[in-house]
Amino acid sequence: MYLSFSFFSLEARLEILAASFFVTMSIYTLNKKTDKEEDAINMPERKKFAESKAIVPLSLFSYAAAITLGGVERRIFILVLLVPLFAGFVYSIKIGGIRLKDIFLMKNTIIAISCASVAIMPFFYSLDYIKLLFIYSFFFMKLFLNTVVFDMRDVEGDRVNNIRTIPVRLGIEKTKRILHIINISIFLLIIAGALHGIFAKYLPVLLFSIMYAHLYIHFSDKMPKGAYDFVVDGEWIYLATMVFAFNNFIY
């Protein structure tokens, strides 16, 4: 969210930063409950956490906090913040014996759409549609790429549970090639955005992101499973820290 405010050339608002934190914590925490069958194989150490009675109350409290913070700021933010909840419901819950998560590419697409939708909340302060196109595309493509990287970690459990991810269907090496192509596409998007005056200020940070993603894609099948969260999801923290430095100490 801090990256998004910066890309839109806006001062970050603490209420929206907090709302995005709470909605993310809520969905990810609740997801551990709905994905316990896959995690029993992929990340068995999560089993005890998934069985905790605190998960549902904690998730509901976090979501209520997010909706309250967003709604006080702008009513439209209530609808935006509900997108991940709806997406998480159709993503994880079986309807007619089928989960959208089990359909090829739907898992990655739904996660990328819902998270990118929350990430571009600063658009409602600027109403700059050109920036919206580039910034939403950046977040969508980056989030899609990252979800597929996690699918490589979880390939065993997904195969057993008949979840048709890209690594399950195509194998690890072909998946890596696809991810490198997506990463190159993100690079071209960043360059095009910089030529339109978007991303230009943060070009060194975003070029670092491209190189960093190239490395974790390349070594994804060699990383310990416990390192994925730190390396892949942790990238957002590294990028936000660098952008913060650019905003406050460099420019």
Image (tube, helix red, strand yellow):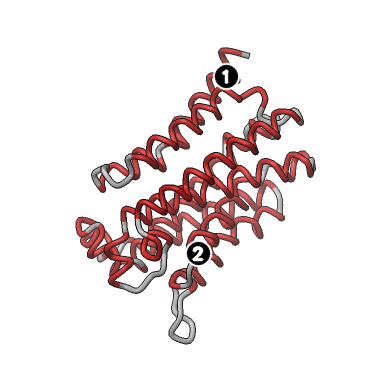
**Where in the figure is residue 22, as x and y percent of width and height?**
48, 49
Above/below status of 79 relative to 203 = below
Along the viewing direction, whichever of 155 and 227 lies nearer the viewer? 155
Q: Residue at horizontal 62%, vertical 50%? A: 70
* Label whose residue precedes the other's in the sequence (1 or 2): 2
Residue designated by label 1: 246
Vertical placement of residue 1 versus 251, above or below: below
Q: In front here: 247 or 197?
A: 197
| Residue 238 % position (x, y) | 44, 30
Q: Look at mark 2 in the image and give the residue it sits on.
A: 105
**81 or 58, nearer to the observer:** 81
Horizontal relation, residue 153 to residue 138: left or right: left
Q: Please tell me which residue lies in front, 59 or 236.
A: 236
| Quarter location, residue 199 | top right
* Quadrant, the C terminus: top right
Q: At x 75% / y 41%, what residue is drawn? A: 125
For the point 50% across and 24% down, the residue is: 242
Mark in the foreground, 1 or 2: 2
For this view, does 200 lie left or right of residue 18? right
Q: Residues within 10 Å of mark 1 (few under 14, many from 20)?
A: some
